[in-house]
Amino acid sequence: MNAAPVTIPAQRPAPSASSAPRFRVYCLSAGRPERVGAIMEAFGWDVTFVTPPEQTGEYLGSGAYRVLGAPDTSTYPLAAARNYALADAFTTGCVCVQTDDDLDGLYAVPDGRRKPAPATFADYTAAWTHAHETTGALLVGCMPTGAKTGRHEVQNEYIPSRLFAMWPNTAGWGGRSLRFDESLPVFEDWDLTAAHMARSRVARCGWLMPRYVPGPHPGGRQDRFRGPALEREIRERLVRRWPAHLSAAAGGDGLKLVAPPSPKDPVT
């Protein structure tokens, strides 16, 4: 995608080259090597595909720049694959960016416009970096599909796992950064959001609006684990685990974040 750069609002200056963090992009994928070209084009960046070990050859054959075969170390392989990507990025001190393989393009709402326009990955990293430096958040994301856009980095909102950036940080956390809970078959991103809120902050960039190919997309890592009864069980478990940060809600995933006692006004 040859997108014209989106102008980042004036109050969010892009970092200088000397201070900019290194971002490493990982695409979590299984059984969909045909998505390699679209993902590489959307990012215009070196992308590492994290796949089941037996599928690495298919992805390399489809033009993937780099492929990691994530071993199935748990019953639920998606969370394990996400942790495999985090470990790979953090070992080299990089910020870990993770995307699903149904991404259809990077879009943002520039100043002075109401509708999303094509954006570049550099626009996204500049926005994420500013949010991290301004709010101190270690987990930074985008708006969920269909959500109302905004002009600010909003703290302590749900960070969808479809596309996010996570900074490594081990200070006071037992010597390691937070990870996805590999015992969760679904809602692992809600759990990670709450875990960060309990220790730090999260931030969501209200003007970043990635688009996705309409689903469903059979063949993914987690498809066989979804179902109303299981999802209800996991929701109840997470509300018990994070009573200060999560509660049940009607609609959507059936979860919502509890407003923290500290202010969560948009950062300007």
Image (spheres, rainbow, N blue to C red):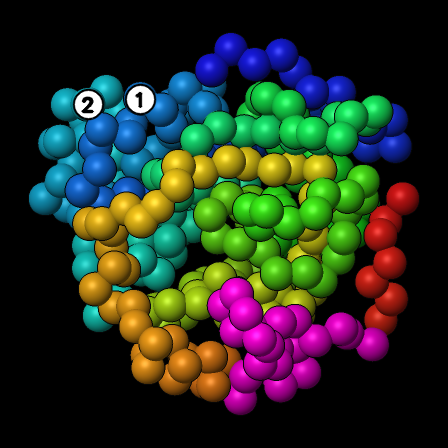
Q: Which residues are magenta?
A: 239-261
Q: Which residue: 55% across, 46% down?
A: 145
- Left or right: residue 127 compared with residue 88: right
Q: Look at mark 2 in the image and give the residue it sits on.
A: 62
Q: Is residue 143 above or below residue 238?
A: above
Circle 1 SS class: helix
Residue 261 image offset from top left, x and y in percent? 83, 76
* Label 2: few (<14), some (14–19) or many (≥20) C-alpha neighbours in 10 Å: some
Q: Look at mark 1 in the image and give the residue it sits on.
A: 37
- Left or right: residue 244 compared with residue 268: left
Residue 18 image offset from top left, x and y in percent? 70, 23
Amino acid of disc 1? Gly
> Which numbered tag is attached to residue 215?
none
The main secondary structure of the magenta stretch is loop
Q: Is residue 73 above or below residue 36?
A: below
Amino acid of disc 2? Ser
User: Sequence order check: which comes first, mark 2 or mark 1?
Assistant: 1
